[in-house]
Image (cartoon, coloured by chain):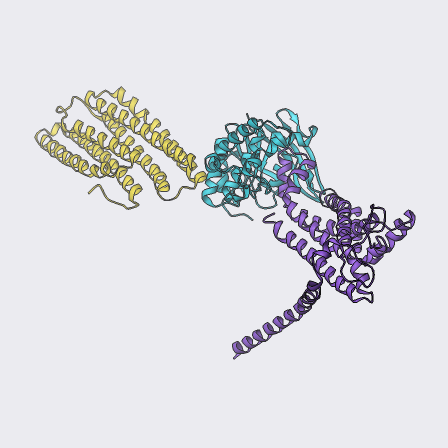
Chain colours: A purple, B cyan, C yellow
Amino acid sequence: MNDIFRKYQNWLMLIVFIIATIIALIPLFGVLGYVLKNGLSALNIQFFINLPKAMGLPGGGMANAIVGTLIMVLIASLIGIPIGILAAIYLTEYDRHSWLSTVVRFATDVLTGIPSIIVGIVIYTAVVLKMGNFSALAGGLALAIIMIPLIIRSTEEMLKLVSHSIREAGYALGISKGKTILKIVLPTAAKGIITGAMLAVARVAGETAPLLFTALGNQYWARSLNEPIASLPVQIFQYATSPYKEWHQLAWAGSLVLILMVIILNLVARFAFRSRSI
Amino acid sequence: MGHTLSVRQLEAWYGSNQTLKGINMEIASNHVTAIIGPSGCGKSTFVRCINRMHETLPGSKVKGEIILDGESIYEQDPVVLRKMVGMVFQKPNPFPSMSIYENVVAGVRLNGMRNKKTLQDIAEKSLRMAALWDEVKDRLNYSGMSLSGGQQQRLCIARALAVEPSVLLMDEPASALDPIATMHIEGLVRQLKEDYTILIVTHNMQQAARIADSTAFFLNGELVEHGPTSEIFTNPNDKRTEDYITGRFG
Amino acid sequence: MRQPLNEGQLVLIELLKKMGEEVERILKGCMQTLISLDRAQAEFWIAEDQKINDFERQVDDECVRLIATQQPVAKDLRKIISAMKISTDLERMGDLAIDIAKIVRRMEGPLLKQLVDIPIMAEKALGMMKQGLEAYASEDMELANDLAVQDDQVDHLYKRVLRDLLVIMMEKPEVLDQGMYLSFVGRYLERFADHATNIGENVIYIATAGRQDLNK
């Protein structure tokens, strides 16, 4: 009697879980499917090599925005990845328990939770207004600031996964602490650290808000890093909010490209650098 | 050649907990000295003091004197000291990012040795001493993690031997291994005492009895008794030693 | 692997062999004394007993050490336990040899007759002891089993010695005491051979873990 009741209960709960999972998946596939349906038709080789056309004209592409996004993500990575990793090394290897590391860790958590638009505003006030113009550098800097806490967090977790006995084995061989970290601990955690960094890159590649105030956007090629530059998210935002049907089409195509970029980065991070054993 | 160690009035703390309470002990060269005692008796702390590993833990403190070959270890740079006092840990811990070969020469290479031929010679010699050469000579470029537990532990021993220490500390080196691998390690320890002074911490009294020339019994941070193994295991002086080795403790 | 245990077992074999040689030397000496009836020599051999006792203690110590430190099991354990028993047998054999010297101390000469069978018994018993130790060293079952046959021969010789002595004693009552002493000697040698069969029994126990009585 009891057994039967328990079996039914089991079944019931299982069905509830399955339904919840399906409901959770609907928006994901919905978004993907919708973007795919609308974006694919507008996506062609023109999109990748042409500049945007004037308002209302058919054709044209987002070549400048794609390149702009890549440039700013590159700038952000060059600033954010080294700083993030070095800070994480300091926190885990040199100063795990002091008040300073507690403060830094708390700040990192807060920074991760701050809406990205606020980062944009801060950079706008601190950099754009001081320099007098919007620029790729300011945009990259804003993205870097969003990246750093993510990288610190992921790197820290990866370093913590490296067993303490590995470090002790290094010291016990008469290897200095610095060399032990550099040549033994870091290589051991390398795959995880790279994965974390790539996920952080994927995360900032789709940021729109901070770029609105920093890189602004540009209908043409930017001639230097010190002037406004186009980026996919901002371009999508502008086109999608315009009244022109052709631009809506391009916005869908841009969305599709952006999603693909993020998915590819995620896949590379997950599979190419999947860590086997730490 | 192994060196003698003499420990004088050694005290160690971990936080507010005193783990060693005034240890005096002479450790003969080219001998296997086993340290036995119940969990928490300070035996691991004791060997970790000898290569100054204990003091790397946050909140730890050491007092007293350890003389290695006539020189106080506390007057030496710990990094230099650890080249003379090698250590093998409880769980085999090869460096995961390195191959078998790289593991063995890690200590020498990361301390600046670049000559390839020399490194290869050191690798072969160390692996031979650790009785592992024949098993791995065809796959030196495989990951150290690809070996079995017993082989990994011998790899760690080879790695420790490669820096040519004079003292080898072993902290329960066989407790994570099966009986056959354990016998391998024990046989190895007996051979190694020709060239090294060996201190081995073990939970396993029978192991101490099998391989050690002399045995020291620790209890609550104190050295209760230290003498020839055959004496400790047939006719110990102290009642507490007898109770412990006969399993009638407490 | 298990090198100290193997080495320890070799030490035991060596110790028992030396102990056997010592017993052999003493028995031969005592037999010599019996023939020459030299009392001074008898005292000398009686004092040699200490050496045998030292050997027995050495064997026991080594066995205790091996058991305490090497945790022998199965055949290893049987070999070590047997070594202790064999050392006890050898010690008893040494005592029996010295008992002959003690007899000489009390005997009045000259000998009632030239000894024939008693020296043969001594030689046979010694041979059995050496064979037993050889069987222990090589764990040779055949050598061990063969001891039963030889023991029968010694028993047979003993019976003949007793009968011969009985005849002489009935004919010449004045040598009654010497006859009695010589029959004791025969008895000691017979016991000596029995201890040698015990060694063989231990070897069979080592090889098969089974018990077999070689002294029927």
User: How many marks on residues?
Assistant: 0
Query: As rendered, which of B60 and B41 lies closer to the eye?
Result: B60
Which image quarter: residue C30? Answer: top left
Q: Position of residue C49 (x, y in %)?
A: 32, 27
Q: Position of residue A8 (x, y in %)?
A: 56, 77
Which image quarter: residue A180? Answer: top right
Residue at image point 82% right, 65% down: A241
Query: As rendered, which of A98 and A241 lies closer to the eye?
Result: A241
Left/right placement of residue C104 relative to residue B147 reads left
Q: Is residue A242 above or below residue C195?
A: below
Left/right placement of residue B19 relative to residue A236 reads left
* One can see residue A91 in this view: yes
Query: As rendered, which of A40 and B32 lies closer to the eye?
Result: A40
Q: Position of residue A146 (x, y in %)?
A: 78, 53
Q: Is residue A262 above or below residue A35?
A: above
Q: Is residue A106 above or below residue B226?
A: below
Residue at image point 40% right, 41% down: C72
* One can see residue B213 in this view: no
In the image as oriented, which residue stretches furthest toward the bottom?
Answer: A1
Q: Position of residue C200 (x, y in %)?
A: 26, 38
Left/right placement of residue C184 relative to residue B37 reads left
